[in-house]
Amino acid sequence: MAKITFQLNGKPVQLDTNPNRRLLDVLREDFSLTGVKEGCGEGECGACAVLMNHEIVNSCSVPIANVINKEIVTIEGFSQTHRYDILRNAFEEEGAVQCGFCTPGMMIASESLLNKNANPTEEEIKIGLSGNLCRCTGYNMIIKAIQRAVKDGDGTW
Amino acid sequence: MVEGYIPTSLSDALTELANHPYRLVAGGTDMLVQHHNLKTLPINFKQDVMYIANLSELQGIQEEEEFITIGACEPLESILEHPATPKLLKDTILEMASPAIRHAGTLGGNIANASPAGDSLVPLYLMNAMLEIQSKDRTRRVDIKEFITGVRKIALEPNEIITKIILDKIDFTKATFRKVGPRRSDAISKLSFAGAVTIQDNLVMDFRIAFGSVNITVVRHPEIECQFITKTVQELKQNKEHIVSLYREYIRPIDDQRSNKEYRKQVSLNLLRQFIDTI
Ligand SMILES: Cc1cc2nc3c(=O)[nH]c(=O)nc-3n(C[C@H](O)[C@H](O)[C@H](O)COP(=O)(O)OP(=O)(O)OC[C@H]3O[C@@H](n4cnc5c(N)ncnc54)[C@H](O)[C@@H]3O)c2cc1C
Ligand code: FES
Ligand code: FES
C-alpha cells in the first residue's frame, strides 16, 4: 500500500492503495469516472485517454504510482470548461460522433493538441489523433470538427 | 503479493536497490503492456517493482559545449520539443508511437527495453551515445553498443539504474531516419534506417549507417563506413552498389509475423541506396 496524492479534475485527492494499479482502474473503480473507457488495454486505441499535466496519456498504460503530485483531468472534468462546449458543438455539427465509444478520448486528444498548438495544420491534427482509434466515423469528420472548433473558438486556445 | 516501491530521491532509490531486487518502471508504457492485468486487478508484475519516472535527478536536458545530456526518465515528447535535441533524434521520435505514449514513455525505457525494433536505438547507435549508469557505490559510462547485448538483453546489474544519455554534438551535413511500418502509432517498426554524412569541400569527412529490426540488435559497421572517408561525393555515389553489397551479409532479419525476411532485406538495402542517392 502507498499514499497517493494528486489533483483530480481540479480537486486534491488522496488515497491509500496498491501502487501497482493502473490509473484507468483507479479512475473507474474508486472515483466512478466511467467516461474513461477501456478499449484495448494496451496503449493502442486512446479510449482511456486523460490529461496529465495538460497532456494526453493513456490511463491504461500509467501506473497510479506515477501520478503522485500530477494534475489529472478526465472527460468529466473537462466537460466543465468552455473549451469543451466549443469542441462538443463542433463534434455534433460535423457528425464526428456515431457510437461515441471513442469520443471522450478524441476530445481529450483534441484538447491536448490545441492547448499546445492553437492553429494546427491538417497533418498536425492527424498526428495529434494518431493514438486514437475510431471504428465508426472514418476520421475525416473528427478532423473537420477540430478545424471547426479552432474557428468557432476564435482565440479560446 | 508483489510490492511497488516509490523512492523519494535517486539516492533513496539506489540505497533500496542495493538491498533488494526490484524491476524498474519508468513511464510504464512497455512494462504495463508486457504485464497486462485482468481488468481492475493490480498490474501482473512478476517481481517487486520500483517507480522511478518522477525522480527529478533523472529528468531534464542539459546542453553543454560539446555534449547534450538527456535524463533517462525524460519523456520522449519533451525530448522532441527541446531545442537542444539533435534533429536526427527528433525525426526519430516523431515516428514513434502516438503523443499519448510519448508523453509517458521515456528514452531510458526505450533503451533498457532493448527490443530489436526499438526505434531510438538506431539514431543512438549512429551518434555513439554513451549511457551513464549508477549504483549506490559507483557511477560508470558505457557505449550503447556495449550496453545492448542481445534481444531484450542489457549489461545492467540488478542494483543499477540508467541515469543519463550523453550525445556528442555533431553537425552532420545530412542525417536521415526512415521507418517502414504498418501504422505510425503501432508498437513496432518493421524496419528502420538511419544515415548521416558530413561533407567538406566535396570530401566525405564522416559517413555513418545504421539499420534497425534486421538483426538481433542495431546493425552498424564503422569498419565499412571508414573505407569511404575522404572520398569525394562522386566516388561515394559511384560506389553505391559496392556499399550495398558490403552490408548485405549483416542484414539478417528474423522471419516473424510482422513481415517476411526477404521483404525486410530488400527494403533496408533500398533505403541505403536512396540515402546515398540524395547526398
Ligand atoms: C501503443 C504503443 C506504441 C509504441 N510505439 C513504439 C514505437 O513506435 N517505437 C518504439 O521504439 N517503441 C514503441 N513503443 C514502446 C514504448 O513506448 C517505448 O519503448 C518507451 O520508450 C518505453 O519507455 P517507458 O518509460 O514507458 O518504459 P517502461 O515500460 O517503464 O520500462 C521499459 C523497460 O526499461 C527498464 N527501464 C526503464 N527505465 C530504466 C532506467 N532508467 N534504467 C534501467 N532500466 C530502465 C524497465 O525495467 C523495463 O524493462 C510503443 C508502446 C506502445 C504501448
Ligand atoms: S484502453 Fe488504453 S489505449 Fe486502449
Ligand atoms: S464513434 Fe464509434 S468508435 Fe468512434
Image (cartoon, helix red, strand yellow):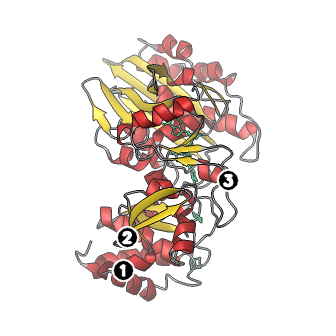
> What residue appears at the point 58 percent right and 78 percent down from the top-left corner?
A101
Splitting the image into 4 quarters, where does residue B149 fall? top right
Instruction: Say which mark, if any, is on residue B44.
Output: 3
Subunit ID for the residue under disc 1:
A
Q: Residues within 10 Å of mark 1 (few under 14, many from 20)?
A: some
Q: Position of residue B272 (x, y in %)?
A: 56, 31
Q: B68 or A66: nearer the eye? A: A66
Instruction: Say which mark, if any, is on residue A84.
Output: 1
Is B239 displayed left or right of B259 in the figure?
left
Instruction: Say which mark, if any, is on residue A111.
Output: 2
Q: Quadrant of ligand 1?
A: top right
Q: A101 or B195: nearer the eye? A: A101
Which structural element holds mark 2? Answer: helix
**Kind of residue indicated by mark 2:** Glu
**Kind of residue indicated by mark 3:** Asn
Q: Are marks 2 and 1 in contact (CB under 8 Å)?
A: yes
Which quadrant is home to the C terminus of chain A?
A: bottom left
Instruction: Say which mark, if any, is on residue B134.
Output: none
> What residue appears at the point 55 percent right and 31 percent down from the top-left corner?
B19
Which structural element holds mark 1? Answer: helix
Residue farthest to the left, as pictured: A155
Q: Position of residue B25 (x, y in %)?
A: 54, 44
Splitting the image into 4 quarters, where does residue B70 fall? top left
Q: Residues within 10 Å of mark 2 (few under 14, many from 20)?
A: many
Discs 2 and 3 share one subunit: no
Q: Residues within 10 Å of mark 3 (few under 14, many from 20)?
A: some
Q: Are marks 2 and 3 in contact (CB under 8 Å)?
A: no
Q: Position of residue A79 (x, y in %)?
A: 39, 81
Which structural element holds mark 3? Answer: loop
Discs 1 and 3 share one subunit: no
Q: Is residue A46 visible?
A: no
Is B141 displayed left or right of B149 in the figure?
left
